[in-house]
Image (spheres, rainbow, N blue to C red):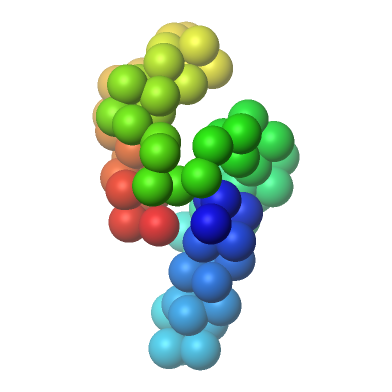
């Protein structure tokens, strides 16, 4: 399964459990506008920490480390 399928299931699960708010909207925005188009080339079980780190370094080098860490945490949870 690729990130798009896993992310959809995660978001649906959050909504079904009453977990909603700005963080979920932010996550959906990141997924739809930035991540899914770039992180679905491999199935999730083949994505490595190096893949994620390279993605973050390539796309978010200009962003504060705390934000990059939050983005990594989002991906890790999904």
58 sits to left or right of 50: right
Query: What residue is drawn where x is 47% and y is 59%?
Result: 23
Q: Position of residue 13 (x, y in %)?
A: 48, 80
**Above or below, 68 relative to 64:** below
**Above or below, 67 relative to 15:** above
Q: Position of residue 29 (x, y in %)?
A: 64, 49
Foreground residue among 33 and 7? 7
**Above or below, 37 relative to 13:** above
Question: Does any portion of residue 63 appear in the rendered image?
Answer: no
* Residue 25 falls in image quadrant: bottom right
Q: Position of residue 39 (x, y in %)?
A: 56, 35
7 sits to left or right of 78: right
Question: Does any portion of residue 77 appear in the rendered image?
Answer: yes
**Above or below, 62 relative to 65:** above
In the rendered image, the quadrant that contains the C terminus is: bottom left
31 sits to left or right of 10: right
Query: What residue is drawn where x is 61% and y is 34%?
Result: 41
Foreground residue among 42 and 56? 42
Query: What residue is drawn where x is 50% and y is 11%?
Result: 58
Foreground residue among 52 and 26? 52
Q: Position of residue 14 (x, y in %)?
A: 46, 77
Tally of numbered discs: 0
Query: What residue is drawn where x is 54% and y is 37%?
Result: 42
37 sits to left or right of 35: right
């Amino acid at each position: 399964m690729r990130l798009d399928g896993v992310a959809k299931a995660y978001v649906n699960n959050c909504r079904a459990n009453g977990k909603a708010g700005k963080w979920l909207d932010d996550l959906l925005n990141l997924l739809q506008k930035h991540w899914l188009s770039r992180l679905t080339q491999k199935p999730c079980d083949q994505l490595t920490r190096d893949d994620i780190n390279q993605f973050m370094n390539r796309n978010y080098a200009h962003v504060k480390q705390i934000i990059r860490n939050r983005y990594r945490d989002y991906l890790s949870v999904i």
